[in-house]
Image (tube, rainbow, N blue to C red):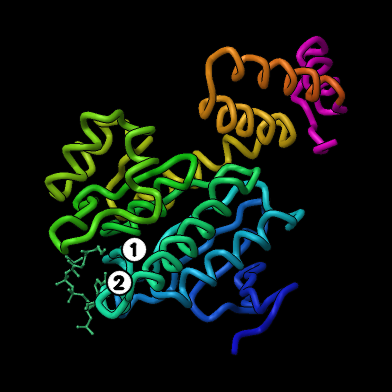
Amino acid sequence: MRAPLPGFGLRIRVRKETLVELEHVLYERADDARLVTVTVNRPDKLNALNDAVVADILAAFVHAKTDPDCGVVILTGAGEKAFVAGADIGELAVMDVLGAKAKSHAGQAALAAIENLGKPVIGMINGYAFGGGLETALACHLRTMAVGTQIGLPEVGLGIFPGFGGTQRLPRVIGRGLALEMILTGDPIDAETALRYGLVNRIAPPADLRAVTEKLARRILLRGPVAVGIALESVLRGTETSLEDGLRIEADMFGLVASTQDMREGLNAFLEKRKPTFTGE
Ligand code: COA
């Protein structure tokens, strides 16, 4: 049995030292910024999501939620070949009706923990992201992708369909027509196409992907952390409802941000022609 919460055996790397570890997920923190990298670490199986990996992803994001030294998360896959090559097909092959439902629920719970982290998560698609892998990337708020790799939802070719939120999140990101083409054909797309679809925010050669992704993360980390979190929540909650209700949520959130020290600091810094120093209060 793996170590229980809290702390739950996370591997946290500070100044390149490994402190603690989950079995299938690395949790590493940059030594100069509130930047955490969560790496799905099952490279011999192209980081395929078996039940244990899914549980570890959930645990890592539960930890990140209350980690005061975590402002932005980069989620990626170990090795050079894959982000996540999908749900573990060996496990899928033996599931029964209730097992399939439980598996879908567990996957959805882990991905909800990513989506509802309250802090930005950037999916760094360093290699193949198929099936549950792409669905994992879709739970992230932003995505970057290596040129030369491919992503897709090939499930219909296996006689199943995307059950970790893919039928719901993909159309919300790229629109129903393009999403249906990907889901119904099961065909993969390359990085250039993903960029054109608006499925990823940046593409880069594999050697530059980390730098491009970190640059994006560090831009966000310069901003007021409370405002970033509230803006994130406003978009996530607001776009799941009517425009009228979404605007109400936005107005409430705008009232909330006005209660922060960071707002006073940000506005005063502009007026005083200096850079703001945000404290997250
Ligand atoms: N589930 C379980 N194991 C997987 C897997 C998955 N989704 N994807 C890859 N693996 C395993 C392979 O079985 C292989 O294990 P082995 O070395 O013990 O035989 C190992 O990872 C390497 O994969 P391999 O297929 O040899 O690599 P490749 O470079 O030839 O092909 C892919 C890479 C991604 C094209 C191919 O692995 C693939 O199509 N994977 C399945 C993708 C998919 O359909 N995902 C959706 C699942 S619902």
Residue at point 16% right, 49% down? Answer: 188
Residue 46 is labelled as 2
Disc 2: CA contacts within 10 A as few (<14), some (14-19) or many (>=20): many
The yes-or-no answer for disc 2 within 8 Å of ligand 1 is yes
Label 1 sits on residue: 84
Magenta-drawn stretch contains 136: no
- The residue lying furthest to the bottom in this view is 1
* Amino acid type at image mark 1: Val
Disc 1: CA contacts within 10 A as few (<14), some (14-19) or many (>=20): many
- The residue lying furthest to the top in this view is 271
In the rendered image, which quarter is residue 12 located in? bottom right
Label 1: element kind: strand
Q: Nearer the N terminus, badge 1 or badge 2? A: 2
Location of residue 16 in the rendering, given as x and y in whole percent from the top left corner: 60, 71
Give the side of residue 71 with respect to residue 151, left or right: right
Location of residue 148 in the rendering, given as x and y in whole percent from the top left corner: 19, 51
The boundaries of the magenta stretch are: 260-281
Label 2: element kind: loop
Location of residue 251 in the rendering, given as x and y in whole percent from the top left corner: 71, 15
Of residues 35 and 39, the one nearer the viewer is 39
State if disc 2 and disc 1 touch (CB < 8 Å). Answer: yes
Ligand 1 shown in quarter = bottom left
Of residues 257 and 264, the one nearer the viewer is 257
Q: Quadrant of the N terminus?
A: bottom right
Residue 203 is labelled as none
